[in-house]
Image: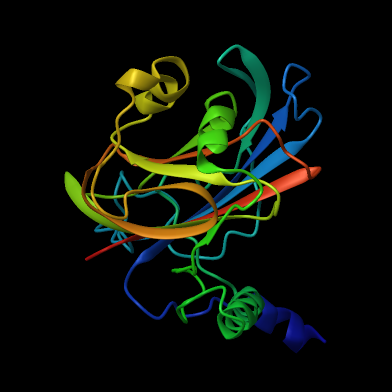
Amino acid sequence: MITHALYGHLIFGFPYEEDINKYSTYIHLQQEWNSYPRNILFDVTTVWSNPYSDVNDPYYEGGIGVHLKTEYNPNELQYLHGKPYVELNHEFSDCKNRWEPIAYRHTIDTLSHQYYNLIGVQLNSDPYVVVYSPLQNSEYELSEQETKVKSGFSKFIPICTSKDVTSYDYSVSINDEKIGFDVYFVTSISERENFHQNFDEFSYYQGNGCSGQNYQRFSGTCENVDKRSGLLIIVPDDLNLSLTEITVNLHEKN
């Protein structure tokens, strides 16, 4: 019994020399939203080349090890185009903590990934660098999606990088089969406000694979993005589930 318990908390050796940054953001929509009282969970995994990994450096906090405690930032009431929501962020969202899967977690992640790979949902073998077979939303047309998402909820997901300019593979999926999301690789978080308030001034990277509209699963690659850039993910204010889960995977290309 003790042996199994200890084994379950062993660090699994990560198969390549990159850091995993893994965190979640929980969103609780308030009464002003059509989707109230529903919630959104963004589950984000970023695999990136951290030059400070394994080094006691002031820009790298946490070091290597198993993070058994789970800490959250305080609930924060925020507003998006005049509508309030509560946001709760997990501790790993600062790109300064290296997450390493313990043995049983890696086993679960691998088996789950192999299943989705077998049925054709995921196209590669790495459980932490995910490539989806694309699936567009069939519930409404793209023109209808464009109208819905402008008044919907959006989240900016920053990248992790030590470079001024880098390139990223990414994938996004949603568990609600009745809605689609839009995703854009944008230059900075300021484009989130532009999308909702000044759409004519909204800008994003125009390269092939840097955006997708009205998808339930999508993967792309965006080349030569700025260190302040990230993904802008938008869902319509038309949620059906009590908890809508949006899974985001980012992988910095060497």
Given residues 12 and 158, the one toward you in this image is 158
The image's colouring method is rainbow
Q: Quadrant of the C terminus?
A: bottom left
User: Is residue 126 shown to the viewer in this render?
Assistant: yes
Q: Say how many tags the image has.
A: 0
Which image quadrant for residue 75? top right
Left or right relative to 19: residue 89 = right
Left or right relative to 248: residue 178 = right
Left or right relative to 174: residue 167 = left
* 241 lies above or below 168: above
User: Is residue 250 shown to the viewer in this render?
Assistant: no
Give how far across and how far down residue 60 sits, in percent.
Answer: 35, 50
Given residues 238 and 246, the one toward you in this image is 238
Residue at 78% from the left image edge and 19% from the top image edge: 31
Which image quadrant for residue 15? bottom left
* 174 lies above or below 34: below
Residue at 64% from the left image edge and 77% from the top image edge: 112
Q: Quadrant of the N terminus?
A: bottom right
The extreme top residue here reads 82
Give how far across and how far down residue 23 sits, in percent.
Answer: 55, 50
Residue at 74% from the left image edge and 88% from the top image edge: 3
* 11 lies above or below 228: below
Give how far across and how far down residue 92 sits, in percent.
Answer: 51, 48
Give how far across and how far down residue 245 sits, in percent.
Answer: 67, 50
Given residues 58 and 99, the one toward you in this image is 99
